[in-house]
Image (spheres, rainbow, N blue to C red):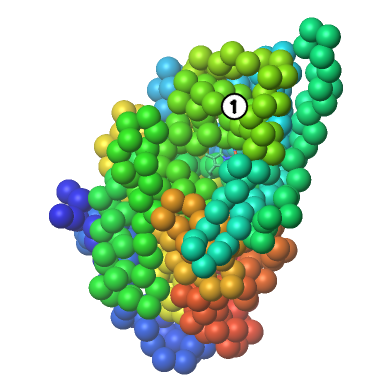
């Protein structure tokens, strides 16, 4: 069943001046292929997305889009009430708190605070990468949990004395059994409350529409278990869309990045997979009552989307090219939220430039299996806020958006080769558009 908003096909393509110009630079015209989105169909001004802007939007700063929901980069969502703003601020403080060994940091961990990786500004990304490993065999993928996988903790609390016994906790290393090793870049968290507020039904419908209208690039949802309800949900967070909610990601990150246990993640991470050494854990009791997890989730839920950068004739032309060469098929410009207890977030149109589905990216895939995601599948990276990112792709291998596009394989190969064949003017317009997001 379609969502009550009727997952729409976006506005029909209007053959405006931009399109004519864009077609001059492009072979073939796929302009009539509708771009898939969950925005309500037709009529309302908010359906107009970056790919089909009428002429009067090109020169105005008040284009209908995510702008209405943003304040500043790192600021709260626009339109919050005072109580929500207070939750945002309290959450942001907790998010920046540095944990200590006495309180529960470690024994192995990656950093002592969320902000060490998610910063510049708070909630963004410093470009810090972390390591995942595992073993791929004909029988399937083994995350090597018994050896501390799949996430490596590259820090440890060091020497501990319990009674008259001493023990030294050391950082984990990739074990020789691993034949898959992949880096993962820290992603920015701006606007993720909106992403969470999109219904599962809307994302499933988007996947169905892709299968029907653009089968060559069709995405699949990563159906994963929600903790603590056990419900099977559409995952949407993380490079593999492996986590369904911000609350769950908070508890998961608190445990796996910082070494803090909490009610839904009560079991301490085993250093290099070794349970025995936990006898030396200096903080064996539950480290957080659940309050901090809630505060992280509050901050992320209420964190505004990245404001759109300056637009020009060139960026709008680039938006047309983006759509015509098939980028928008996966990087869905427009989504709409469902109901939300936060009224500023309910039934809002926004522009993440992602379908939050998995796509087979060929050799670009990282080889790690998570939930239903295979080694080759990755979540379409949202492109909003692209201009504020230090590096691109899951492992940060690309230093420029252009390099990132040229790495697209598998279902992304066709769009990549169309990009590679663009004449310089159209290519520059596309890159200017990406830098304006
Ligand atoms: C050591 C660096 C590091 C620390 C510390 C860290 N993160 Fe992250 N964060 C990452 C990386 C890397 C990813 C991508 C993870 C993946 O896909 O496996 C990520 C992804 C996320 C996401 C998903 C974002 C998206 O784009 O879908 C959320 C939510 C998140 N982190 C929240 C937190 C919270 C809350 C904390 C503190 C409890 C935290 N992180 C601490 C590195 C870190
Ligand atoms: C088949 C779906 C698909 C198509 C078509 C596609 N992309 Fe992507 N794109 C992805 C996925 C998946 C990723 C994440 C790859 C990874 O995890 O390393 C990505 C990543 C990116 C990134 C890096 C973003 C970041 O934050 O790291 C950019 C830039 C990008 N795409 C631009 C484009 C452009 C421009 C086009 C059209 C030429 C395009 N993409 C076509 C699926 C697609």
Q: Is residue 279 left or right of residue 342?
A: right
Task: Work out whether 405 lies above or below 230.
Answer: below
Could you say which is closer to the camera, residue 428 or residue 94? Answer: 94
Task: Work out whether 383 lies above or below 325.
Answer: above
Could you say which is closer to the camera, residue 112 or residue 386? Answer: 112
Quadrant observed for ligand 1 in the rendered image: top right
Could you say which is closer to the camera, residue 425 or residue 168? Answer: 168
Residue on which the image places disc 1: 268
Q: Is residue 360 left or right of residue 12?
A: right
Image position, residue 42 (x, y; %) = 22, 62
Q: Quadrant of the N terminus?
A: bottom left
Looking at the image, can residue 197 be seen?
yes
Q: What residue is drawn where x is 27% and y is 37%?
A: 339
Q: What residue is drawn where x is 52% and y is 48%?
A: 238
Image position, residue 129 (x, y; %) = 70, 49
Task: Work out whether 435 lies above or below 32.
Answer: above
| Mark 1 burial class by Cα count in 10 Å: few <14, some 14-19, many 20+ | many
Q: Residue furthest top?
A: 163
Looking at the image, can residue 14 be seen?
no
Secondary structure of the residue carrying numbered label 1: loop
Question: Based on the displayed image, in which of its 4 quarters is residue 45 positioned?
Answer: bottom left
Image position, residue 262 (x, y; %) = 52, 21
Q: Quadrant of the C terminus?
A: bottom right
Q: What residue is drawn where x is 73% and y is 55%?
A: 176
């Amino acid at each position: 069943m379609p969502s009550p908003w009727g997952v729409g096909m976006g506005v029909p393509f209007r053959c405006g001046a931009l399109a004519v110009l864009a077609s001059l630079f492009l072979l073939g015209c796929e302009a009539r292929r509708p771009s898939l989105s969950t925005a309500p169909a037709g009529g309302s001004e908010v359906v107009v997305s970056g790919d089909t802007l009428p002429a009067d939007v090109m020169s105005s700063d008040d284009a209908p889009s995510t702008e209405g929901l943003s304040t500043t980069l790192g600021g709260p969502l626009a339109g919050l009430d005072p109580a929500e703003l207070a939750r945002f601020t309290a959450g942001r403080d907790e998010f920046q708190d540095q944990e200590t060994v006495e309180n529960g940091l470690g024994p192995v961990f990656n950093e002592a605070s969320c902000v060490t990786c998610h910063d510049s500004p708070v909630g963004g990304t410093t470009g810090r990468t972390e390591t995942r490993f595992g073993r791929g065999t004909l029988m399937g993928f083994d995350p090597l949990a018994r050896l501390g996988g799949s996430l490596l903790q590259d820090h440890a609390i060091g020497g501990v004395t319990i009674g008259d016994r001493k023990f030294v906790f050391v950082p984990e290393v990739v074990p020789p059994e691993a034949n898959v090793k992949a880096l993962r870049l820290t992603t920015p968290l701006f606007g993720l409350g909106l992403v969470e507020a999109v219904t599962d039904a809307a994302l499933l419908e988007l996947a169905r529409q892709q299968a029907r209208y653009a089968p060559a690039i069709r995405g699949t949802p990563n159906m994963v278990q929600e903790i603590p309800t056990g419900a099977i949900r559409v995952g949407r967070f993380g490079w593999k869309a492996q986590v369904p909610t911000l609350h769950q990601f908070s508890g998961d990150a608190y445990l796996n990045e910082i070494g803090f246990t909490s009610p839904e993640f009560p079991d301490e991470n085993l250093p290099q997979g070794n349970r025995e050494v936990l006898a030396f854990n200096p903080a064996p009791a539950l480290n957080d009552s659940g309050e901090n997890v809630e505060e992280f989730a509050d901050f992320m839920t209420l964190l505004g989307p990245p404001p759109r950068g300056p637009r020009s004739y060139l960026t709008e032309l680039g938006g047309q090219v983006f759509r015509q060469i098939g980028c928008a098929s996966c990087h869905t410009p427009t989504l709409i939220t469902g109901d939300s207890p936060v009224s500023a977030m309910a039934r809002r149109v926004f522009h993440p430039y992602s379908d939050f589905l998995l796509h087979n990216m060929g050799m670009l895939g990282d080889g790690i299996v998570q939930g239903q995601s295979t080694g080759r599948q990755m979540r379409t990276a949202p492109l909003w806020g692209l201009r504020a990112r230090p590096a691109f792709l899951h492992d940060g291998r690309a230093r420029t958006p252009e390099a990132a596009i040229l790495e697209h394989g598998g279902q992304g190969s066709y769009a990549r080769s169309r990009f590679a064949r663009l004449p310089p003017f159209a290519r520059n317009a596309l890159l200017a558009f990406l830098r304006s997001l």
